[in-house]
Image (tube, grey):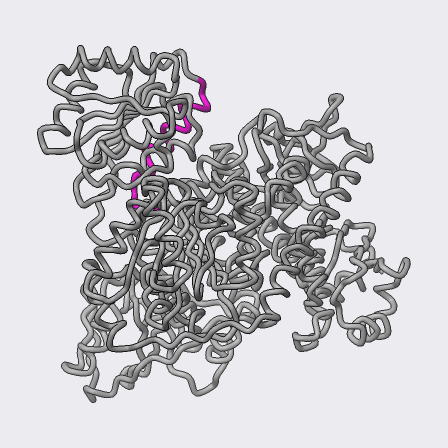
Amino acid sequence: MLCLTGEAAAEQISHSGVIEVGHSKVTQSHPGNCDSPPGYPVDHKSNSPFSGLIERLFEASKPRVLLSAETPGRVQSLVELLAGHDLYPTPVESWDAFLESPPDAPAIVTSVLDRGLVAAQPFVEIIVESQLYGERVHRRKRGRSQDPEAIIRSIAELHTGDPVVHLEHGIGRFGGLQWLEVNNQKNEFLVIHYAEEGKLYIPAVNINVLSRYIGGDPEHAPLHRLGSDQWKKAQARAKKRAHDAAAELLKTQALRTLRSGRCYSVPHTEYAAFRSGFPYDETPDQEHAIEEVVADLKASSPMDRLVCGDVGFGKTEVALRAAFVVAQNGYQVAVLTPTTLLAHQHHNTFAERFADYPIRIEELSRFNSPTASAQLVQDIRGGSVDIVIGTHRLLQQDINFHQLGLVIIDEEHRFGVRQKERLKQLREEVDVLTLTATPIPRTLNIALSGLRSISLIGSPPPGRVSIKTTVQRYSTHLIREACLREMHRGGQVYFLHNEVRAIDRVAADLKDLIPEASIEVAHGQMPKSDLESVMRDFYHQRFDILVCSTIIESGIDIPTANTIIMNRADRFGLAQLHQLRGRVGRSRHQAYAFLLVPDPEFISETAKKRLAALEALTELGAGFALANHDLEIRGAGELLGEGQSGVIEEIGFSMYTDYLNRAIRDLSGEPTESSLKLDSVCEIDLDASAFIPDDYIPDVHTRLVLYQRIADCEDSAALYDLKLELVDRFGLLPVETKMLFQITGVRIKGEAAGIKKLRYGARGGRVGFHPDATVSAPRFASLLAEHSDLFSMNGPLELALPTGLEDPELRAILADWLLDTLDESNEIKPLPSEIRDNLANDS
């Protein structure tokens, strides 16, 4: 293997005229004649992605060429690719071997070279992978970090018994993978169980027709019957509901568009001074969100932006900047919070940040006396209050603002129906900024783009330490030790016990166990005033341990509470565990979460997986990624209204958001680019063995994950990268796996063209088109005219394919050529010679 980097080689040639590689030396008679290497970028969207490299290798006056790839697998991939262009590089293992190889043919080596070079003496060129793929190849060389998305995939992939949605047959249960032989071709199939013992076998290559069911409790997901019309009826109901929801969203948007918004100016000197008052460095996501909000305020159209980020990721600072700009322009700001305690906390934060400015900030809540409240309402009406912070009391009819410019809403989903109606009216009148820690699913984000602006804050603040999480059997010794350790460093403890009837007994037991601690109780069945009094006392560090129910899930920030102990953690859902754990770790101190469970024999496998996942997901931001997956339905209810949840449960969240996306585009008159993939995905059947053999990857779950990743590739570049990854991880691809990648490449092109099904065997085949297919009509006519002996129409939406191609590889080549020919963005290429020769021999 070569051991010299391209950079070092170039440096040695240009300064000393000598390259040293192992025991080989190459002397250059004219040092300094070393040029920067050109690039031969691979264009996966092109009909000939590697044309730059191929043209260079066929040049008559080119230098001797040495190709370099990092691993034997990638060398093999490059060799196979060049063989398709009648180029056969000579494998070499050293520089001397390269110089001794035939001069008229390129050579190839397995090497860690990261940059190429062109030298004058000897007249040689070294071409490395980064010249072909850019920096993508170097990203693979770095050590693997803990990837939150990868962890999510590993716990979210299909397991036996999980509900899945088939596009045409509805919701069934996944029954695992099974090997079957059909038409003398062995393949791996996914088994889906339906009602009344119905079974569906789906080739692994067509796994894209399935999606994981998200819509409610998996245990109670619907189970449809094969051959019945219940799935079609459910889809029809969902389409109508999605249409109604889209119409409502567009109506609100239209009313806002008709009203000309205020253009706020940003006083640069004052704003810079206010910004410098922020004691931390902004995270990249936070800075981007602030820029988007300020841009919205400066624009003429009214703002309706949602800022979404994990707990403690800096959403409040975004609100503070917006409030500063609006208040400096002479308009009032209203900050709405769901609880009095949160209002009090926000008031303290705003008062501290605005202390040096002549801006009056007030808090309106039931802690105000009647006289003080009446005076404050009058001052708001008169305009002497610049920023007012309060609960839904601010939405009552007697509150009239002098000149309201901005409404900031914290956790809108926690307000009631009446308050939401009032907020809807406000959206038509003023600028609105909403803050939420409930993640918005990516699919829904796409569906609402243009209707509601969304800023995501996914990066944690600098200096934040991740929460150390451990799952332990219930132990009084552990509880006492954890509480005392936190108290000895001046902190406080949450002890979570979610059975209200036993919570006082648990608190009494804790007092006996830790007599040196002061302990109080908080739960949702207490009188509201008592609950708020306890929480205020905890906030002001008047006692050490709070024994509580899940009432704290969306509570106030208490930076001194940095240990949480959850009793019977196995009874909570993954999202709830994440939210509860987020109550601690709000400062720069190390926080701890202890998840207590009974004997492992008495908890379910599902609960064990949830707890293991939470224990693994301690990285900052990983929790947000996890919640994004697990809270999808909560996010949907928040944005779409609770009335949509029933229909989401009926067909699954993914399909519903697709329908909503389609309805929004249809009603707004935009082209529905994704509609072809909505009602039908492209199914390919080339009567070929296309699978990952169990002797190549023995683990069933790993194979399933890879089938899904292959199906998820959206273009040929992603597919090629995944192919290289498999070669690197598991070795050279078996013939069947190469076919799997070929068929997937055909499917990607077929989906883009609007093809529903492509079935092709030795006795011929057919291509079924979607009514809205995007194939070029002139290209289609030209194909039928020039190749009338091979292709014909069976009907308005079906093309017949020629018989006689016994080799599945040739059928894949013909299918690929056909789709390229029908795409007018590609140059027309002649029918591949091997296809023409094979068909001629058959006839």
Is 245 positioned to the left or the right of 692 in the image? right
Residue placed most toward the observer, 53 or 820: 820
Q: Is residue 370 above or below residue 537?
A: below
Q: Say which quarter of the image contains residue 613.
A: top left
Residue 757 visible in the current orientation: yes
Q: Nearer the viewer, residue 442 or 739?
A: 442
Q: Position of residue 783 (x, y in %)?
A: 81, 71
Task: Considering the whole magenta stretch, tell me its main secondary structure.
Answer: helix
Q: Residue at x 42, y 42 (%)?
A: 338
Q: How many labels sit on residues?
A: 0
Q: Residue at x 70, y 43 (%)?
A: 167
* 807 to the left or right of 55: right
| Residue 109 visible in the current orientation | no
* Horizontal and vertical percent position of residue 5: 24, 67
- Image quarter of the C terminus: bottom right
Which residue is outermost to the front? 371
Looking at the rendering, in which quadrant would you find the N terminus?
A: bottom left
Q: Residue furthest left?
A: 488
Q: Position of residue 688 (x, y in %)?
A: 68, 46
Residue range of the region highlighted in magenta in the rendering: 604-622
Residue 209 or residue 381, whichever sits in front: 381
Based on the picture, tell me whether residue 594 belongs to the magenta stretch: no
Rendering quarter of residue 592: top left
On the picture, is 731 further left or further right than 830? left
Q: Is residue 616 magenta?
A: yes
Left or right of 262? Residue 651 is: right
